[in-house]
Image (cartoon, grey):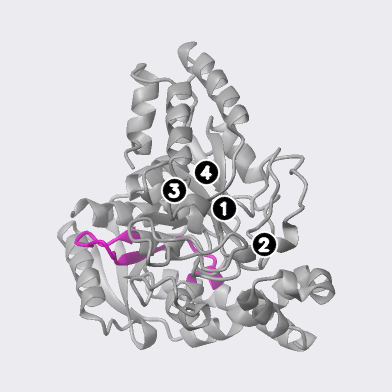
Amino acid sequence: MGAMNLRDTASALTTGRTTSTEHVRSVLAELDALTGTPWENAVAARNDAAALEAAALADEQISAGNWIGPLHGVAVAVKDNIDVAGFPTRCGSAVLADAPPARRDARIVEKLREAGAIVVAKTHLHEFAYGPTGLVNASGPAAHPHDPSLISGGSSSGSAVLVARGIVPVALGTDTGCSVRTPAALCGIVGFKPGFGALPEQGVFPLSTTFDHIGLLTGDALDASLAWGALPGIAHLRTPVSELRIGRLRGGIWEQTDPVFAEAVETACRTLSDLGARLVDVELPETDEMLEVYPVVTGSEAYETHREWFEADPGRYGTPTAALLAAQRDRLAHEYVRAARAAGRLRREVVHRLRTVEKLDALITVTTGVRSAPLTSDPVELRAPLLQRCIPFSVLGVPAISVPAPEGDSCPVGLQIVGLTGGTHGHGSHPAESTALAVAMAVESSA
């Protein structure tokens, strides 16, 4: 638990204080040290020889003056529902226990490699990314990085654990309803879900093609900003917080009944106000409808993907996953079509209202309704508190980032920042992402 963050690692590599080979060897040694600990299964697969070969190439490039950017020569981990050439993609399930190695990288992994990053491991996930706890996996549950009696959150559980334990500075995850943001919130790190389609999904095993997003997990918001900006095709510029109008979500599930959560939001809002941002209270009356259409669309699309495997041998799935799939078996086509159309309408209408009527650049709320839970918890009981404050922003397809509240402790509070800024206006190629990152960094800096 002592690995450098991304910016320090990049600095050490470019100044010659370390080499990529030394860095990768150190990371591999930390992965070795997980053996026999509660976090051993955070790693789903490794290919040390390939990682060291890539590190040697990065050393040659950097020493020749051909430095690509902050990810060049840096060890990263990838969630095991994302294809990495030479690794099987097992999605945390016995269903794919005999999966052959992927023949090519997913497009997002290609982008990581284009940026110079080095894949050192595939990581644990909640089975087929169909759950927010990290409890369901053929290798067993993923333990919290700092208290192994607690859950890590999911579904990008192993990626969050490796980042939170300081083993890798950056990891890839996926986020359909909460799966980058929730484990980040529970583990006390940053989980960044860019807008829908901002990062390519080719080569990623689908849960719901309507809502699936790729995301990044890092130790803090500055590292998330650096990693995002280092990806090919991303023109990322810092957005001045003093120019922003930010909505504090109120009403319904957005009211904070837990005083710890309420104080975390208010402290963050005071920080942003002190920096010149304008904070306004705002409601999201479409929340209930978004929470209704999400499971219909996601469940229908998941069942279509799994139908043949599930009907042939449902016993190969974890019990909670099998129950979720079985519940979709008799779903009528018109129910799915109605929900999918409603999701499209909500995406258009709500984002338009928030941007042009409310004139908002961002929203702020908490990420989850609980701070963590015992490993012995019932996954069914945890679905709502871990999912429901994240789902609306997956339905809307807008970028959202979970950042630890500044005064967190061993059981942190995740604050969720949602980016809404439209147009370009000097914000780079992805203005809403730039806004979300800027607000997250401002909140983080108040610590």
Q: Nearer the viewer, mark 2 or mark 4?
A: 2
Expressed as whole percent of the image width and height from the top left, the position of residue 318 reads 65, 72
Mark carried by residue 198? 1
The residue depicted at 37 percent of the width and 77 percent of the height is 369
> Where's the N terminus, which quadrant?
top left
Q: Amino acid at mark 1?
A: Ala
Report if residue 61 is visible in the image.
yes
Q: Does residue 348 show up magenta in the picture?
A: no
Earlier-in-chain disc, 4 versus 1:
4
Dots 3, 4 in contact, CB < 8 A: yes
Q: Name the amino acid, label 3.
A: Leu
Give yes or no for contact between labels 3 and 2 (Cβ–Cβ under 8 Å). Answer: no
Q: Earlier in the sequence, mark 2 or mark 4?
A: 4
* Label 3 neighbour load within 10 Å: few <14, some 14-19, many 20+: many
Measure the C-alpha gap from mark 2 to mark 1: 28 Å
Residue 336 position in % (x across, y down) = 72, 82
Task: Label 2, secondary structure: give it.
Answer: loop
What SS does tag 1 mark? Answer: loop
Magenta segment: 393-418
Label 3 element class: helix
**Answer yes or no: do the residues labelled 4 and 1 have beta carbons within 8 Å?**
no
Query: Which amino acid, by three-letter code, is at mark 2?
Result: Ser
Determine the residue positioned at 48% across, 34% down.
28
The residue identified by callout 4 is 77
What is the secondary structure assignment of the residue under circle 4? strand
Please name the amino acid that badge 4 sits on. Answer: Ala
- In the image, which disc is placed on residue 162? 3
Name the N-terminal-most of marks 2 and 1. Answer: 2
